[in-house]
Amino acid sequence: MRASKRLRITALAVAGLAALQVAWIAVMIPYFGIDEFDHGYRASSVAAGHWEGTSDVVPATLGRGDLISVRSDVATAARPACLARVYTGPWNCNPVRSAGPGRVLIASAASRYNPAYYAVVGTVAAPWHGNANLMVMRAMTALLSALLFALAVWVVLGISRTVWPLAAVVLAALPTTVYSSAVAAPNGVEMFAGIALWACLLALFEGAIARRERAVAYGGSALAGVVLANTHTLGLLWCALTAVVMVLAYGPGRAWRTLRPRGGRELLAAWGLLGGAAFELAWVLTTHVNDPGSVQAGVTQSPWPSVVEGLVLWPFQTIGAIPMRDDPAPTLTMGLFAAVLLVLLVAAVGRAGLRTRRSASIVAVLGLSYVVPAVLTLRSYHQIGPIWQGRYAAPFTAGAIVLAGLALDRAPAVRPRVVAVLLGSGVLAVVTGHLTALVSVTRVQAEHTALVAATGWSRPSVLVLTLMCGVTAASWWAAGRSVNDGPRPSVREGAHGHDRPLAAVLR
């Protein structure tokens, strides 16, 4: 594919995502995103050079987290949204005392989180005040996420024979993922880093690629890995499990030959990844962030009902839990995305073959996406209760979608007319699901009349949201139609073993 055409397709895909992000930024009341006031405090603190909280102990009855130094205008702007949450304490919403000219001490549950994301968005937003400060942080979060999405699209286009890898990357931007990328919190960046990591690794493993293509895929893998590791406490775990699945999909020998650095630039990228992972590990060990042992909630009930319930609940939370984990997206949104995902995954496994490594890797991702939270819930339930949220596994679960797209790409060709119908139906279903979620959240938020009045939020009209989603639909349709379903490469399918039956490979 020509570079100019590839750039055009990437730009169209990113434009579609950006339209949804702008819609979500407009839809959400300031600081009313999931724990957004906590993250806004943390960004204000880190931007001023305060990486850690104070040594003051915050009583559980008065708030969550540690006291941190925050700009007084940020604390004032976040107060209405903070007070609207039922789980906050007085010290989370009201300054405890002064911390110097224009600054106050206030409690934040994000006080011990890795400072990397907050240093970036907080520094860029520092010249603005109040709600404007938050909007700049939201815009920066959306931009960082869109750049990672662009990386994912660009690299999969380099290995695509059909439209399916592109369609899978676009589908991986689920409503929870897109929403998370439009609020001032690191989760959205983490989710898109997961998508980019899967895309870059698959680009590395899929056959012989040009030297320049390998450099982008290798460097992109390192960059995405560093971002993934440093935006959430579980990032290192997802990086490790992604590597495990790649070994399962391609074999340990090929994994070593592919990932082994070749040349100075790749060696530098590898060391950068190791350095980023080491920083996150050191941060977790020294700050004890999200350590269940530091909390003793005294939950006496059995954890098994929550674990069994999670088999259904967690996947749907991954699709659409907005704005909080207990706020499900509309049934139509859930149904449309569940249907599209089910068709994609079943078709991929069916066309790749039940006993092939491609199918095994898809099943492995889906299985681990349940087993990991189940094990963590069992181990921590009596300390912190049913704390797991489906979005926590989104960076890893996205791999099943990206792997499915590649499996369909390598399967026997489908008639172009059938592809066009499937592509059109998929785009319509996905964008309708996004629009339904946007409209629903807007209406629910409008019912908080006191909060709306206190924040000065202006409710966007359904027409505006429909137009934004129309831009998304047009952009993604044009991107899909532009992909060339050209002749398949002459390399024999399965030459590297990843499409051979598992039994034959493991013997």
Image (cartoon, grey):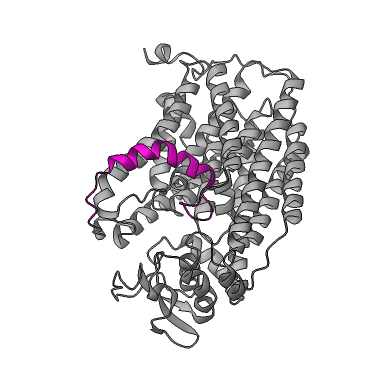
The residue that appears at 46% across and 24% down in the rendered structure is 250
Q: Is residue 304 magenta?
A: yes
Up the image or down, 368 lies above or below 161; here it is: below
Q: Specify start and end residues of the magenta stretch as a single range.
A: 298-327
Up the image or down, 5 lies above or below 81; here it is: above
Locate the C terminus by quadrant.
Answer: top left
Is 226 placed left or right of 151 in the picture?
A: left
Locate the N terminus by quadrant.
Answer: top right
The residue that appears at 49% across and 47% down in the rendered structure is 268
Residue situated in front as seen by the camera: 497 or 464:
464
Res 46 seen here? no
Residue situated in front as seen by the camera: 5 or 107:
107
- Residue 120 is situated, as x and y percent measured from the top left of the image, at 54, 64
Up the image or down, 455 lies above or below 506; here it is: below
The residue that appears at 67% across and 25% down in the rendered structure is 161
Is 446 placed left or right of 393 in the picture?
A: right
Res 266 seen here? yes
Q: Is residue 208 magenta?
A: no
The residue that appears at 71% across and 46% down in the rendered structure is 16
